Amino acid sequence: MLNRINQSKIAMITVITGIILVFDILTIITNIYIAPVLEGFGLPDILIYMKTLSFLLLFIILVAWLKNKDAVLTRSNLKIVAYISFALLASYFLSLFMYKYVLILETASIIKNQILQGNPVLVFDFSAINYKTLTYITTIFSGFNSEIILFAEALVFQLCVVSIGRMTLVDEPNHVYDPFLFDNYVFPLFSFLILSSFLSINLFLYRFDTLGSIEMVLALTGFTAVLPGLIPSFTLYTTRHQDCTRTFFKSTYQLLLILSIVAVVVFLALTTLNIYLNYLGRGSYRTISSSISLILAVVLLFRTKKMLYLENK
């Protein structure tokens, strides 16, 4: 676990995380009240909420550790939360860039095919559509989620992630755990869960209606929640015949347990939504993949909880 000697570094990361969080909140306010509302929801409209929640979670963890002297925080778990936040920041940057590119292509197509070569009577209607789209794009360019601000956030936060890997740890005694406490099935189960959760994402659209956007939020949240479990589960698998600290053992299984609980809740909601979409005649293969993800998450929940119950050091 982290030594209290790292308090100044943690405080610096907390301030940077808080600043990024403020920019995210201002971006959401801009999207709701200032930017022109286009028809449907784009992928950036979904990812901004996920990015905000990830940085909010990181901010709460850091503040709790700074305020509570008895709080325990391991470097590996902090790195995982920071990596998730950084990955969502990069994903939001990429989705915003591609989304604006697609909107510009659509506008160019309307100008060429509907205005210059189309019915002159509809020129004003299509011009109004183009003006609204271009106003949306220019608002983003000059807003809190412009590429220059996101680029600066990524550069500064990357330094925070690197500094986490250099933090000092508390010296702890190693223990020898029985091999059966390192569950052989956790790693392959998480691997299959990551695959099935990825297949639950709708990769064929870039704009969504209300139900489609909810489905996308749930699918992306589920995939984001289970992906960090791959490395800890693999680490447990490779530590089977080695000694380790009690903090490593408990914190790793606790992290996997939390991820499993989140996965169960998210994929239960996603499976229910997909069943409802089937009822509306909008069903897809994602009903099967989300159901498989739900089953795997439930199995992982019970297996990780069992290992924590058997821990006796």
Image (cartoon, rainbow, N blue to C red):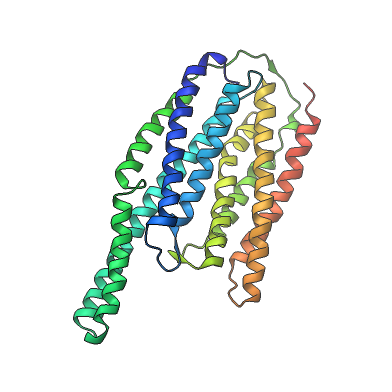
Q: Residue at x 28, y 63 (%)?
A: 134
Q: Residue at x 21, y 76 (%)?
A: 112
As drawn, the residue found furthest toward the front would be: 33
- Above or below, 264 against 258 in this view is below
Residue 312 position within the rendered picture, expressed as x and y whole percent measured from the top left: 80, 24
Q: How many marks?
A: 0
**Which sits in the foreground, 230 or 35?**
35
**Which sits in the foreground, 131 or 281?**
131
Q: Residue at x 79, y 37 (%)?
A: 306
Residue 135 position within the rendered picture, expressed as x and y whole percent measured from the top left: 29, 61
Task: Classify residue 120 as left or right of residue 247.
Answer: left
Split into 4 quadrants, where in the image is the N terminus? top right
- Above or below, 206 against 234 in this view is below
The reply to whether residue 165 is visible in this rendering is no
**Which sits in the foreground, 2 or 239?**
2
- Above or below, 115 against 29 in this view is below
The reply to whether residue 188 is visible in this rendering is yes
Q: Residue at x 65, y 46 (%)?
A: 262
As drawn, the residue found furthest toward the left would be: 116
Residue 171 position within the rendered picture, expressed as x and y whole percent measured from the top left: 61, 12
Split into 4 quadrants, where in the image is the C terminus? top right
Residue 158 position within the rendered picture, expressed as x and y whole percent measured from the top left: 40, 32
Task: Classify residue 256 as left or right of residue 101.
Answer: right
State which quadrant residue 86 falls in.
top left
